[in-house]
Image (tube, grey):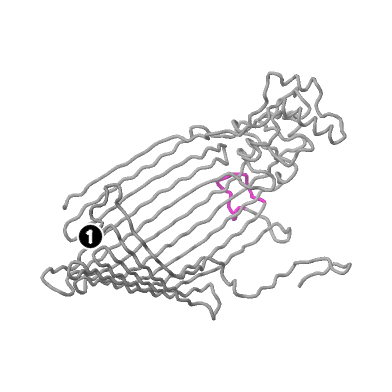
């Protein structure tokens, strides 16, 4: 005791997709597409020469092109702990970085977090020769974390990166050729730029291929990962608990604690003019968006506990307590259009010049919400010689999520236990037979995991419908 101990833990690894989905190669794709065309009463889309062209070429493996292999993962933890008879402490600093298995110049998935944590306990007063108020202890546990992340598009109406990697045309190369495409589905770089000046290119100016005409629901997944846009998520989280405990009498303790969870999180995004596909994957103007959220939760608990054994066989314990908590959340978001420059470092709302007259500004939106829960509880336990046990509990909970006449409810419970192997007549039981307990219990429980104001009757406008041969506009 009294000496500080320093520890450093580090781990480093790599991540890879463990399996790729089996999909059609180029020739299989053409054969299936021809069958679909013929079954629909049309001529085959690809002729024998087209199919022969890919005899020794399986086409583009879009999963292979999309995955980021050997994505690094690292974790560092430095901690210091020490103390003496009156005080103990622990302090740690951590850094975590994970690069995702989906790669790209702009939209690579990744996660980074810095964290710090401190724990301490301190004995304010201790007197072993007293029978009451013989010990007072206080303590704290606090932590802070800062996280930043970017992620790939998922569950999009017009196809996500991974969805396109599974279903995009394998005949199409990643980059558009300069000239002489080997099949009509493939367009040259110049023809793409002539028709779509905002077509996505890589950092060296090479043009990414686009889907063929009639198949514009999906986009080149590699181009999606190189599209000049950004959506960065951020979070600051500060949590802590402060407590104090008093030994009132032998076996009787009182503990009071206050805990909090304060979080700020948001996202900043931008998008420059681009073209990936004709349907839902293009824009002729730049845009920028930002959102901010703040959540705060506090919890107060006061607990009186007692634990005493009488005549070496009778153990009695009880707990009486109160708990209250409240969570509030606020959010604010906005967006604008037409950035002054196509520079990611200047992609913020102040650099946009869209106005309401042009109906380009989404404007600001915000919200506020809260939930609260109050509880009173008690528990009584009796244990005779580790053979017979009885426990009774009761709690009364009140939730803000229920209506004025139903906010509070009482939840009792009782249980009986019998440890047969501690009976004298079963002392000589086999070694493999080491546990035999019987327990009977009854209780009531509740659930407040519902949305706020579900007890109210709501009306919603704009739910228009046809009735009686006419169009009814709901108000």
Q: Is residue 474 magenta?
A: no
Quadrant housing residue 367: bottom right
Count of picture labels? 1
Residue that carries the numbered disc 1 in the rendered image: 424
Image: 340 above or below 369 = above
Which residue: 34% across, 59% down?
437
Which residues lie in the magenta part?
338-351
Q: Residue furthest right?
A: 469
Q: Position of residue 229 (x, y in %)?
A: 61, 44
Q: Residue furthest left?
A: 129
314 lies left or right of 404 = left
Q: Position of residue 445 (x, y in %)?
A: 47, 69
Image: 475 above or below 287 = below
Q: Position of residue 374 (x, y in %)?
A: 43, 74
Q: Residue furthest bottom?
A: 405
Which residue: 50% across, 70% down?
371
Label 1 element class = helix
Quadrant housing residue 41: top right
71 lies left or right of 188 = left
Quadrant housing residue 85: bottom left
Mark 1, other Cα within 10 Å: few <14 / some 14–19 / many ≥20 = few
The residue closer to the viewer here, 386 or 444, is: 386
The residue closer to the viewer here, 163 or 8, is: 163
Name the image quarter holding the C terminus. bottom right
Q: Position of residue 362 (x, y in %)?
A: 66, 59
């Amino acid at each position: 005791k009294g000496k500080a101990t320093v520890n450093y833990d580090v781990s480093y690894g790599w991540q890879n997709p463990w399996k790729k989905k089996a999909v059609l190669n180029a020739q299989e794709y053409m054969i299936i597409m021809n069958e679909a065309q013929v079954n629909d009463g049309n001529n085959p889309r690809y002729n024998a020469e087209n199919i022969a062209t890919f005899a020794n070429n399986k086409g583009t493996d879009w999963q292979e092109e999309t995955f980021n292999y050997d994505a690094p993962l690292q974790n560092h933890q430095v901690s210091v702990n020490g103390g003496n008879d009156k005080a103990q402490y622990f302090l740690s600093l951590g850094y975590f970085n994970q690069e995702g298995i989906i790669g790209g110049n702009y939209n690579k998935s990744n996660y980074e977090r810095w964290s710090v944590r401190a724990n301490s306990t301190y004995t304010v007063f201790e007197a072993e020769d007293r029978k009451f108020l013989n010990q007072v202890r206080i303590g704290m546990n606090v932590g802070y974390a800062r996280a930043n992340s970017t992620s790939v598009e998922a569950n999009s109406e017009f196809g996500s990166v991974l969805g396109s990697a599974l279903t995009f045309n394998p005949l199409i190369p990643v980059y558009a050729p300069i000239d002489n495409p080997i099949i009509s589905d493939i367009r040259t770089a110049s023809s793409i730029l002539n028709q779509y000046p905002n077509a996505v290119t890589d950092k060296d100016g090479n043009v990414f291929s686009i889907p063929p005409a009639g198949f514009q629901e999906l986009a080149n997944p590699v181009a999606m990962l190189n599209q000049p846009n950004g959506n960065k998520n951020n979070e600051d989280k500060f949590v802590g608990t402060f407590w104090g405990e008093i030994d009132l009498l032998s076996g009787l303790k009182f503990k009071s604690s206050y805990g909090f969870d304060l979080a700020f999180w948001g996202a900043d995004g931008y998008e420059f003019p681009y073209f990936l596909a004709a349907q839902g994957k293009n824009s002729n103007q730049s845009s920028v968006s930002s959102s901010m959220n703040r959540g705060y939760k506090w919890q107060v608990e006061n607990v009186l506990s007692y634990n005493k054994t009488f005549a070496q066989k009778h153990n009695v314990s009880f707990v009486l307590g109160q708990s209250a908590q409240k969570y509030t959340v606020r959010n604010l978001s906005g967006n604008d259009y037409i950035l002054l420059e196509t520079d990611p470092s200047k992609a913020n709302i102040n650099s946009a010049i869209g106005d309401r007259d042009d109906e380009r500004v989404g404007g600001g939106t915000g919200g506020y919400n809260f939930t609260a829960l109050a509880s009173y509880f008690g528990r009584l336990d009796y244990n005779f010689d580790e053979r017979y046990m009885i426990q009774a509990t009761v709690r009364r909970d009140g939730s803000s999520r229920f209506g004025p006449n139903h906010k509070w409810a009482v939840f009792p419970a009782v249980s009986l236990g019998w440890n047969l192997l501690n009976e004298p007549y079963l002392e000589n039981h086999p070694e493999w037979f080491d546990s035999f307990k019987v327990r009977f219990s009854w209780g009531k429980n509740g659930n407040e995991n519902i949305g706020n104001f579900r007890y109210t009757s709501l009306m919603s406008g704009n739910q228009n419908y046809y009735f009686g041969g006419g169009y009814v506009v709901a108000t």
